[in-house]
Amino acid sequence: MSEATTPLRTRFCEMLDIQYPIVQTGMGWVSYPRLTAATSNAGGFGILASATMTLQELEQNIAETKSMTDRPFGVNMRGDQPDVDARVALMIREGIKLASFAGPPSRKVIDRLKENGILSMPTIGMPRHAQKMQEWGVDALIAQGHEGGGHTGPVPTSILLPEVCANTDIPVLGAGGFRNGRGLAAALAYGADGIAMGTRFLLTQESGVPDHIKAQYLQTNLRGTVVTEAIDGAPQRVIQTALVQRLESSSYIVRFFSAIKNAWVFRKITHQPFLETIKEAMAMKKTRELSFAELAMAANAPMLTRATMVDGNLDAGILPTGQVTGAIDQLPTVAELLAEIVTDAEKQLARFQR
């Protein structure tokens, strides 16, 4: 079967000029140049995670990624960041192919990206959100089901994905529970144009997460994750650790003051001026309709994630993950992973052509 006629050559591939409809999502503290470039070089589409980067760091990371690949890659960011206009300007200047968003970007941001030839792709967790984003003019969607890692919605992938595909006419990628070729074939059968994976790419050789942290993921079984609001006030899937159990059993007041402390440390690590921190907090409060107590908890999450993903501190951090971590037991290279997924997907799809 030629590349031109294979079912794996979807609209999403055509849109981005990539070989396979497989996306490595923008995971904070994880999706750095080495992993992003490796994904694009292997025929997929890598995405840098910029929400935990300063503007200057993002510029440096884009340059580093370009030095490692001549293939297209994207940048993930928060639509409510105070410097979102500057980040968009940087992406325009650098010729970035696609901007992805963990939440809904504003219509103004979508329009500016479109006017400058940059594709936009938000992640949604409910069918009605997909329809709204399409009306606003986004180019593609990631439909993440309840199985997904980090912040996640209540609807399972097996229900969400076909509903979104049936009610939109732009490319949709499935996320939440995908790790292999069978999953890719299933997503295509649901009507999707590909899959987006976080945890599966986190558990590769090119991922910069410390080895002993990766080992913790590999040791986690299918029942070893939990969706909790104790970290930042929003449902987030993480590995069930002693720290998470303590957070869930702690009083709201204790979590609040812990969050204030961690938010201050996070500000010093990112070298963000105090006024910028306040400005960003107010923007987040407005777009997410958070109380000041919930806002402090939301600011806590990046520090807890960094403690594990960068510092390798299991006792002081959290491990965002998809439920699929319980079904993963190997750490392949990105090239090996994509080759295995593609081979398996083609094998599964061939069964329906006999």
Image (cartoon, rainbow, N blue to C red):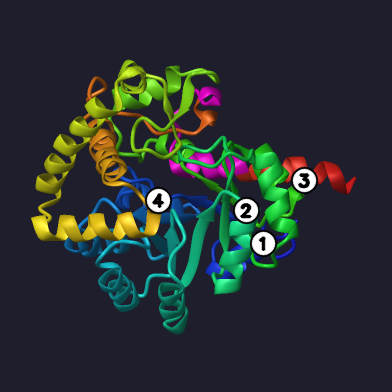
Q: What residue appears at the point 32 percent right and 25 percent down from the top-left corner?
A: 213
Helix, strand or loop at mark 2: strand
Q: Does the image show residue 37?
A: no
Q: What residue appears at the point 48 percent right and 19 percent down from the top-left corner?
A: 224
Q: Which residue is mark 3?
A: 349
Q: Are marks 1 and 2 in contact (CB under 8 Å)?
A: yes
Q: Earlier in the sequence, mark 4 or mark 2?
A: 4
Q: What residue appears at the point 57 percent right and 59 percent down from the top-left corner?
A: 141
Q: Are marks 3 and 1 in contact (CB under 8 Å)?
A: no
* In-image side of 224 versus 155 (left or right): left
Q: CA distance from mark 4 to mark 1?
A: 21 Å
Q: Which residue is mark 4?
A: 26
Q: Which residue is mark 2?
A: 194
Q: Which residue is mark 1?
A: 10
Q: CA distance from mark 1 to mark 2?
A: 7 Å
Q: Earlier in the sequence, mark 4 or mark 1?
A: 1
View extreme (right): residue: 354
Bin the neighbour count of mark 3 within 10 Å (Cα to Cα): few under 14, some 14-19, many 20 and up: many
Which secondary structure dominates the residues rendered in magenta?
A: helix
Q: CA distance from mark 3 to mark 2?
A: 14 Å
Helix, strand or loop at mark 4: loop
Q: Position of residue 11 (x, y in %)?
A: 65, 66
Q: What residue appears at the point 41 percent right and 55 percent down from the top-left corner?
A: 47
Image depth: mark 3 or mark 4 in front:
4
Q: Position of residue 103 (x, y in %)?
A: 45, 56
Q: Which residues are magenta?
A: 326-341
